[in-house]
Each structure stands twice: as structure tokens, then as C-alpha cells.
Image (cartoon, rainbow, N blue to C red):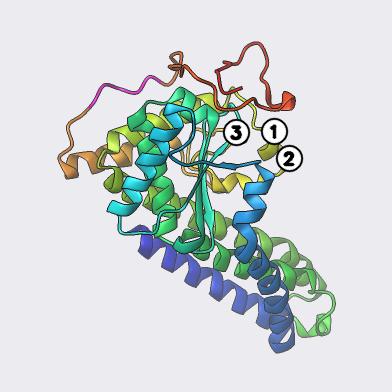
Amino acid sequence: MNHLKTFMLLAALTALFAGVGYMIGKGPGMLIAVALAGGMNLFTYWNADKIVLRMYKAQPVDESHPNAVVRTYVADVREMATRAGMPVPTIAIIPNDQPNAFATGRNPENAAVCATTGLLDMLTREEIRGVMAHELAHVKNRDTLVMTVTATVAGAISALANFAMFFGGDRDRPGGMIGTIALMILAPMAAALVQMAISRAREYEADRVGAEIARDPHALAAALEKIDAWSRRILNPTAERNPASGQLFIINPLAGRGADNLFSTHPATGNRIRALMDLAVKMGVSARAAPAAATAPARSAVPVTDAPAHQRQSAGAPRGPWG
């Protein structure tokens, strides 16, 4: 169903692009818009992993790391990737107290999965496995490619809207000047709404596939609840400075919302948890204790790295040995 929804939304986005292109620029305008949007997104697609890893100061890790929690994290990711029949991605940690994780890379052969030190500090081993299985699912589903195609078409629509004043005479367009102005405002908004809907559909699908890879929907549900609760309390300075990168994370690192929102790249956490509980019933996985999102997180004994001073939290936020 999520694949079908993605296909239908992509078809709607393509139809919107064709309609806007015909109304504004016809052939020449459409070609220029596609070339501009495609060029920018192709560069981003090809270099996304390097750009994002550098932005978040991600540190690749392996089984030789001195911290036992990190060694277990690496071993679990390797085991799940192998069992899922996919190449083992680059495995990294991000020095940030906010519990979160993301995947990046243009294809499974050039992918990276990252967990913050806060995630490794605050979640149990089973919950970390659930989160990283979700990220492996993004890699396996080639969601980076899907979202790049989506961003290219949405960007082309925005480019066409910006070119509205330069292609053709106003009298030749439906609605004249008023119609042109309305198109300039509404077309990019419509494209962004469809783009965000596709992003939410891919998150639901990654939850489903990730739960199957980890073989434990309850662990992923518990992790989502904990991450959602802590992400509202602990600042992610890099994400705040680069809000466009927020869609990469398993939970929006900027702010939480109580319901699926047309302007949100992530589904509501409660809806994701309910879907995972339904999946657990179908998989025949027995229920575990209810997640305790607001309780004090467990602490690891050995720190991995010292977080930069600007990432240290206020007195009201938890400070683990990672920071």
C-alpha cells in the first residue's frame, strides 16, 4: 500500500509539473526547469552521503572501537544487513545528545547509517536494533533515489513558477496576470505538499520493512516513543541550522507534532506506533511492556567521545557519558 501511495503521488506530481509547464512555459520553459532542478539534485544525490556526514561530524566506527556499546551497535548493523541480503553500509556515530538516527547514500553500495551518541546512550540494545533496521530499510528501498526524483520534479515546478513572468504573454495564459500570480504561489505549495506526503509514505514503509528485518516491531515502537519524547527536550544544533536535513532522521529533530500534518515530512509518532502494533499481531510477535518514553534513560559506563561545547545541553536536559 505504501509503494502504491508513493507511485500515485509521484504520478500526481508529474501531472502537476506537466500542467504547470504547459500553462507557463510550454516546451522551452519545461526543459529549462527540468535541467536546472535535475542538475542541482543530481549533484546532491551523488554527493549526499559525504555532505551530510561532514555536516554532522559523523565518525565511522567498526568492531575495534574501545566502547562495548559501539562494538555491539556495529555488530548488530552488520548482522541485520547481511541477513537482509544487502551490502553492509558505512556505520557511523554522531556526537550529539539528542537520540536520533538517519541513513544516506545514493544506493545500497554507497550508503551510510548513523546513530547519535544520545541514541546509543538512552535506548536498549533491542531498541537500537529496531532503529537501525529502519535505517537499513531506507537503504534497501532506495528511498534516497525516490526522494531525489521527487525533489527534482518539485524543484522543477518551483522553477517554472519563478519563470512565470518570463515565458509568454500574460494574455495567452488562463486568468491573465492574476492567474499567473496565483500559479506562482499555489504551484510550489502543491508540489511541496505532495513531496512531504511521499516522504511520510516512505517512513511508514521503512517502519514496516525495518520491523521485519529486526524481527521485533515492539522494539521499534518503543524506540520511536522514546526518541519522540527526548527530541522535544534536547536540542540538535546542526539540524536547527540546516532544517532541510531534518527529513533524513527517523524522528523530526526540530519539533514534534501530535498528528499527521500536511506540512510535515514525518508521520505522527502515535500513528507509526499503532501501525507497528498491528504489524506485530500479523507477525505473531508477543507484546512487550509498554514503552517508557518519559523515564530516565539507562546510562552506559564508558564515554565514546566528548561533544563540542555548543552541543552541551541546558541544566534541565539529561547529560550522558557521551557528552
The quarter in which the C terminus is drawn is top right
Up-down relation of residue 300 to residue 172 (above or below): above
Label located before the other in sequence (2 or 3): 2
Q: Mark 1 and mark 3: span between their CA atoms?
A: 12 Å
Quadrant position of residue 182: bottom right
For the point 46% across and 13% down, the residue is 296
Asked whether the viewer can see residue 272, the reply is no
Secondary structure of residue under mark 3:
loop
Q: Which residue is at the front of the view, 44 or 37?
A: 44
Is 291 in the magenta? yes
Q: Are marks 2 and 1 in contact (CB under 8 Å)?
A: yes
Between disc 2 and disc 3, the foreground one is 2
- Residue at which label 3 appears: 255
Which numbered circle lies on residue 237? 1
Q: Mark 2 and mark 1: span between their CA atoms?
A: 6 Å
Q: Which residue is at the front of the view, 311 or 173?
A: 311
Q: Amino acid at mark 1?
A: Pro
Which residue lies most toward the left here? 284
Which numbered circle lies on residue 80? none
For the point 36% across and 59% down, the residue is 86
Q: Are marks 1 and 3 in contact (CB under 8 Å)?
A: no
Quadrant position of residue 271: top left
Which residue lies most toward the top here? 315
In magenta, the rendered stretch is 288-292
Asked whether the viewer can see residue 9, the reply is yes
Label located before the other in sequence (1 or 3): 1
Secondary structure of residue under mark 1:
helix
Up-down relation of residue 83 to residue 123 (above or below): below
Across and down, in percent, residue 262 comes to 54, 48
Q: Mark 2 and mark 3: span between their CA atoms?
A: 13 Å
- Residue at which label 2 appears: 241
Q: Residues within 10 Å of mark 2 (few under 14, many from 20)?
A: few
